[in-house]
Every structure is written in C-alpha cells, then in structure tokens.
Amino acid sequence: MTTLTKLGYELPGFSSGLSLQELEREIQQHTLSAYCITSAAGDFLAMNHAYAAFYGFLRSEMLGRHATILLSPDQHERFHQAQAAFVANGENAPQNMAWEVKTKEGRMRKITVLSVRVVLAGDEVCVVTLVEPEF
C-alpha cells in the first residue's frame, strides 16, 4: 500500500488487485488534483477532466495514446527510461519528477509530478500520476 500526499490532499494506500475503475474511484474520492493513469508501457488508461484540460485536450483525444504526446521529442528517451525503471523496480514508493510538457497547441509548461506504481487486478502494473503546474 502507498500513500500519496499532493496539494494538501492525501490519497489512501492503494491495495493490489483493484480494477482500473475501482482505482479511479479511489483517486476521485480523495483528490481534486489533475491526475492520469498510464499503463506500464506509458499509454493513457484514464484521467480526469482537469488533466486533459490542462493540456488543452479532451479526455477522448488522449485515452489510448502514449504519454509522450505531451513531451518534446528530446524528452522521449528520458520518459521511456524513467517509466521502465519505475515500473520494473517492484516498489510502490512515490516518485517526484520535474518535466517540461507541451500542450495540444504546442505551448511549453513546467510541471512537477508525483507518481506511484500500482498493481491492478490480473497483476497489470500501472502508474498513477498527479500533476502540479509550476507558476
């Protein structure tokens, strides 16, 4: 189980074996932060409206696409290495990282993310990420 604290909201520890829908319900009950859930490979599985809107997308435009759509090409390798290491490490400890991301219109923004590795039902590994823009 892992606890995430972000923007004054505390998310409870996530037990292994939740379905994607159960995990998303847990997140929605405990935070107003922009969040996404990605597969181990980095594809968007779920997100809230705040996350999609932050980047200028509709949720339907992002679901199933790879998270690198939000990064400049020179950051793709960093993302792939970070995601692979995070998923493979077997620990569910939260991880903070700073990124420069791009919106749908190409505007660059600096953010800090807090991510945690979660094991879903069927032993599928995913990553829950909360986003905080830097002002």
Image (cartoon, helix red, strand yellow):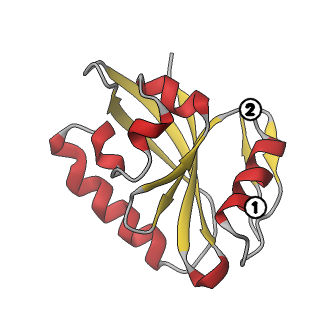
Task: Point out which mark residue 98 bears.
Answer: none
Residue density around tag 2, few if under 14, some if 14–19, many if 20 or more, within 10 Å: some
Q: Amino acid at mark 1?
A: Glu
Q: Earlier in the sequence, mark 2 or mark 1?
A: 1
Between residues 27 and 1, which one lies in front from this camera angle? 27
Between residues 52 and 98, which one lies in front from this camera angle? 52
Residue extending farthest to the left is 74
Q: Secondary structure at mark 2?
A: loop
Task: Point out which mark residue 32 bears.
Answer: 2
From the image, state whether disc 2 or disc 1 is nearer to you: 1
Q: Position of residue 132 (x, y in %)?
A: 57, 31
Q: In the visual, does 106 lie left or right of 43? A: left
Residue density around tag 1, few if under 14, some if 14–19, many if 20 or more, within 10 Å: few
Which of the 4 image quarters holds residue 21? bottom right
Please tell me which residue is depicted at 54% across the width and 61% down the height of the picture.
127
Q: Position of residue 120 (x, y in %)?
A: 64, 74
Kindly identify which residue carries mark 1: 22
